[in-house]
Amino acid sequence: MSGKLACLDCQFGDAHFPCRTDGQFNPGKLASAYRTHVLNDRSETGKGGTHWSFSCMGELIDTDPMLALDLVLRLAAQIDEDEEAGSLAAGPLEDLIACHGETVIDRIEAEARTSARFRYLLSGVWPQRQQDGPIWQRVLAARAAGPDMDLGDRLPPLP
């Protein structure tokens, strides 16, 4: 991970860049806050003031897709419920593929070759009007071996 988030001015400045530790972007802080707020809580304010994590994840996807994919992989290793997997798949992973598919597809394919858990996440991603495109065909191929959340499969355990 590069350790830098490209945001120029944090809209949560009163919190002094809550995603940072000692002035440096801390992916662990963002992952923890995102899991608490978006994957578990889903309320407007979030537990412990973690509502900022949704905006920060969006900024990360927009500005640094490889770092965003690193964060998705970090979150994939932390989740333990099918519902969390669905939110992670239909949220940041789907956005990454829709917005930056050409940038992240090689890493997605590599991860899918070795991780049933990641293939499970890919099964929860929809094509976002790209179903006939070459990137989407590669996503389908990468997730083909399953498991598949739409078929009722469960979140695979970590290896």
Image: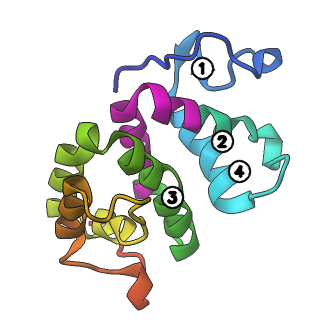
Asked if 142 appears above or below 52 in the picture, the reply is below
Residue 88, numbered circle: 3
Residue 24 % position (x, y):
52, 14
Q: Amino acid at mark 4?
A: His
Which is nearer the eye, 120 or 79? 120
Classify residue 57 by image quadrant.
top right
Mark 1 or 3 closer to N-term? 1
Which is nearer the eye, 35 or 146? 146
Q: Amino acid at mark 1?
A: Arg
Q: CA distance from mark 1 to mark 3?
A: 22 Å
User: Residue drawn at (58%, 9%), measured in percent from left and top?
Assistant: 23
Q: CA distance from mark 4 to mark 2?
A: 8 Å
Mark 2 or 3 closer to N-term? 2
Residue 54, numbered circle: 2
Asked whether the beta carbons under mark 2 and mark 3 sit within 8 Å of each other, the answer is: no
Q: CA distance from mark 1 to mark 2?
A: 15 Å
Asked whether the beta carbons under mark 1 and mark 4 sit within 8 Å of each other, the answer is: no
